[in-house]
Image (cartoon, helix red, strand yellow):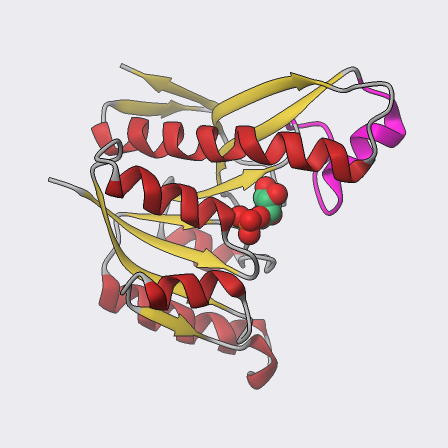
Amino acid sequence: MPLSLAVLLSGRGSNFAAIHDAIERGVLDARITAVISNRPGAPGIERARQWGYPAHVVDHKQFADRAAHEVEVLRLLAAADPHVIALAGYMRLLSADFVARYPHRIVNIHPSLLPSFPGVDAQAQAVAYGVKVSGCTVHFVDEHLDAGPIIVQRALEVRDDDTGETLAARILVEEHIAYVDALVKLSRGRFRVDGRRVVFE
Ligand code: GRF
């Protein structure tokens, strides 16, 4: 059975595009049942419409608070009934209540080798710190920021002349590979989460 997938995004949507391409190429056996953006003008939601996916905008600015916004997102997710929710540049923190509804079923991609450099501007943080190696991490989402069990990481060298922008561009190439790799692994279903460790069988 294909993995049923919902994608939550806020912006450009290049990771979403990589997931879409992998499905089209037959690399990833999945079906996208909903794409949800919290930003009305997000290029990613435009792509979703063009590609014919059920596309929804739930503009957080139209809701009184985080909880009210999440109620609407959860309503759409319940209707779409995904097995896995992929955050792909979704710039909203999920509440502990939200996360608890989908234990080990929400995944995120972050542009650093976690636990180094969580939060915003991870690539610029890495350059400023002077690390020689950085990369990206696909992880399960828990109630803390960029903190859940790690599914896949990909590393690359930081160059002496890197800026946050040049490093981000190279990491992004790795992100697209890592996200597809992680979803392929999850789609096979043969894994367990042992404390912090995700073990593939
Ligand atoms: C990526 O760098 C991802 O790691 C971070 O947000 C960015 C989203 O890019 N969480 P895109 O919208 O997938 O192109």
Asked if residue 117 is among those painted magenta in the image, a careful observer would answer yes
Residue 172 rendering spot, x and y as whole percentages: 59, 36
Quadrant containing the C terminus is top left
The residue at the point 66 percent across, 36 percent down is 169
The residue at the point 59 percent across, 38 percent down is 110
Residue 57 rendering spot, x and y as whole percentages: 45, 75
Residue 105 rendering spot, x and y as whole percentages: 35, 43
- What range is drawn magenta here? 113-131
Where, by quadrant of the figure, is residue 30 drawn?
top left
Residue 141 rendering spot, x and y as whole percentages: 49, 43
Most distant residue in the left direction: 1
> Front-most of 92 and 53?
53
Asked if residue 43 is among those painted magenta in the image, a careful observer would answer no
The residue at the point 73 percent across, 31 percent down is 167
Q: Is residue 196 visible?
A: no
> Front-most of 81 and 196?
81
Where, by quadrant of the figure, is residue 173 drawn?
top right
From the viewer's perspective, tell me whether residue 35 is left or right of residue 115. left
> Front-most of 197 and 136?
136
From the viewer's perspective, tell me whether residue 188 is left or right of residue 86. left
From the viewer's perspective, tell me whether residue 51 is left or right of residue 142. left
Where, by quadrant of the figure, is residue 165 drawn?
top right
Q: Is residue 151 visible?
A: yes
Quadrant containing the N terminus is top left
